[in-house]
Amino acid sequence: MSEGAYQRLWDASHATLQELLDREQPLLEPVPKRDRQAFQHRLSSLYLRYLGLLRRFDTLYDRMVQPQKRRLLRRLLDSVAGRVLELKEELVRADLCETHCLDRVLQDLTLTPADLEVPIPRYFLLEQSSVLREQRLRVAQLLSRMGSVSLEPDFPAMHRTDAIILLQTAERARQGQLRATIMREIRKEEERDRKMREDGWHTFNQNQAAITIQKVWRGYLQRKRTQQDRQMEMEFIGMLPSRGHVESLGTVSQACPTEDAARLRQMEKEEAFQVALVKTRDSLKDIEGPVMKEQMKEQIRQWFIECHALTGRFPDYPDESSGGSYLIFADKTPEQVKMELDMQNQESKKKNQEKNKEKEKEKKEKKKKKGKEKKTRIEEEDTMLKVLPSKFIPMIHAGHEEYKNLWKNPYDSVHPGQSFDPETLRVAKRKEVEQELRIQVDELMRQELKNLRLAVGREVGRPLKFPKKNTEKKAGKKKEKDLTSDRSVDSLFEELITLDLLKKSETVALKDYVGDCLYLGSTLSLAKKLPMPSLFDIRQNMALYGVLRLGSSDIHSMAPLIRSILLVGPSGMGKKMLVKAVCTETGANLFDLSPGNLQGKYPGKTGVQMIVHIVFKVARLLQPSVIWIGNAEKNFYKTVPTEEQEMDPKRIKNDLTKALRLLSPGDRVLLIGTTERPQLAEMKGLCQTYERVIFMPRPDYASRYVLWKRMLEAQGVQVTQSLDISALAKVSEGYTAGHILKAIQSVLTEQRLLRLARRPLVASEFLGHLAKLEPVYEEEEESLRDWYFSTPLGKKMMKFMKDQEAQEARLVKEKKKRK
């Protein structure tokens, strides 16, 4: 696409953004709980529209070249991503569930299931590529150094004569096998010639030979036509992808050079813009700087004279911390300054008198207020639904206004070769230069004010009090003691690698976690059946809770804070794969605090404090970071098994919860726990440590179908009509993605892959290997489901469903009475 096409896409995106901003205000008004469905529908539609907008802004930021536009697009991209996360929190509060049934909303908005996919901004990894390269190089060097020290020969050295004899034996065997293959082909050829002579094929005349060739050729043509007709029919009914779609997939590799060229253009324009920033600043300082200084001085001198004429004394100069002369001349006149001073003196006297009376009243009123506030909150929560105020909407408004003022009528259309808008740049830089010069002018004018006081009336200056900014720290936060203040980050980094606590994560894309969405969620809800999350829902939650937050510091600092996630599901569901995918998509470091990995490391109470402290300290300094705890239930065992008492799995329990509380917005550190048996843990401790619990049930039919198809294609198998994937998806009910992968790997050996051209795959080949694997039985899944519904969020959902059933029963009774 050309720059003009991207400009048109930007214009269309802002038209959509204006519609969404108009819909935001009605959401802040409380809604009765009886209108819950309409409220959920409004939230869901807004959430899906913002997802589409996020996808557009990501494309625009990735492809546009103009530096000033890209800066605005970056702010809009982060703001829209933050609003998506806020709406996700609101959906969880409204649905009382981590997954949502959006099939009805998709139909109303005429969208496809692909529009549910959470787009991951491409700049996450592009901007961290250099940092990631350095970290991976450092880890590789440390691992190679450790490997070179610990490597020892595992087998005795072989004598030269023995090695020669072994090579000669292998070579003679290879030559013998080759000779035998050639002789076998010769014998087959001789046998074929002998049969032809016996059958009398050599007696064919010319007409008989022509008729035979025609039969064979016509049969081949008819089979080919039938196959093409069948292909067209399957494409028409949507059972096979169209040829155009398959051909377009082949052009993805050709897009890479185009993307590289666009990246180079972006870098060139950015370098030119950085040079222009310095030149513009220097030229403004040299040309307009002296004029600005003189204007500021004259304005301040005039203020001195007017204040002296009104009050009989010279004013006090504000401190640099309160803003200097900018605070005075923002929007104030000398008369206003005098009134402010008088008001401050009167208010200070009144405050001293009223303080004593207020203290006594406050003590009595606090008790009453607390009781009333609790009652009103409970009543509001019980009767009304409302959306919390957004932190990102003001930022989106500001970006939208900047677009309308500067970029709606593009400057590039007038000067198409311009890499940036010089006038906009000068306006922005003029403000920065003015702030720098004001600091210098304030120092000069303070000295001049002292000289004026000494010359006129020998006045003594007193500090001018201005309202202070809220720089106080929030009460209740404790400072963390640095147990390793005398050590460098590099030494701690090496220590964690040496002890295998900091691991090199495998490269796994989040899109590789394959699964389909739940198409009948709303239908199941209407039938009073709880829809279970699909693999698509799980992937979407990991993108929202993990990837979007860790990928950008601006998003993380303002989005609803999530410090920890717990993945609950049977073995083979891909819990570790999701952890690796979060690290891959965000470039995060992977720390392993699993109980099995901590055995024998940092013994004693001080050792436990030290290990948790070092891991969280390095994780904060080298963010983004993911701290993974496998078998997370072991940290919160109800009773520790005798065979694991030596491991002492509960030893980091208290220090872990304390370290998590110290994480604040902006600390891109995420704790991810994985467990197969959460029933063995104390519910209270586990749910207090892990703020979000994602339940991972067995894959449904749609997800199993996609799993079979994608995994076979990943092994290099072209899925044909002879292989009934639908039957495989039906037969593999109860099996996880790990089971399906094992069955495919067992069948598709090297020999079987070589014979695919002559003997295509059949569904029955996988049945024997599936039968050898142990599926996830319904009892096991029901146990995990019951545990999930005993979590705080699960309890709220069950309570809501019971209340709804009771209300419906009440309505039925009332109808019967009326009859």
Image: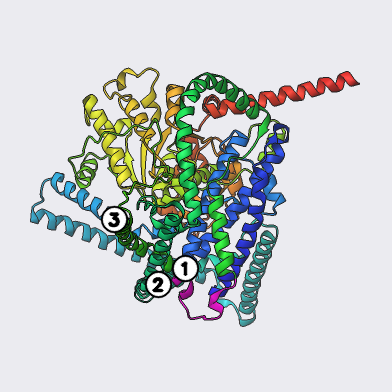
Label 3 – label 2 distance at C-alpha: 50 Å
**Would residue 708 be seen by someone viewing this image from the given angle?**
no
The residue nearer to you, when weighing 446 against 109, is: 446
Q: Are marks 1 and 2 in contact (CB under 8 Å)?
A: yes
- Asked whether the residues under the numbered discs 3 and 2 touch, taking CB atoms below 8 Å apart as contact, a structural biologist would say no
At 76% from the left edge and 25% from the top edge, which residue is drawn? Answer: 808
- Tag 2: Cα neighbours inside 10 Å, few (<14), some, or many (≥20)? many
Mark sitting on residue 273? 2
Which mark identifies residue 142? Answer: none
Q: Nearer the viewer, residue 462 or 488?
A: 462
Q: Which of the two labelled residues, at mark 3 and mark 2, occupies the earlier sequence position?
A: 2
Give the residues in magenta.
409-426
Q: Is residue 567 above or below residue 244?
A: above
As measured in the structure, the alpha-carbon distance from the residue carrying label 3 to the one carrying label 1 is: 51 Å
Pointer 3 or 1: first along the chain:
1
The residue drawn where x is 60% and y is 70% is: 8
Question: SS class of the residue under badge 3?
Answer: helix
Q: Which residue is mark 3?
A: 454
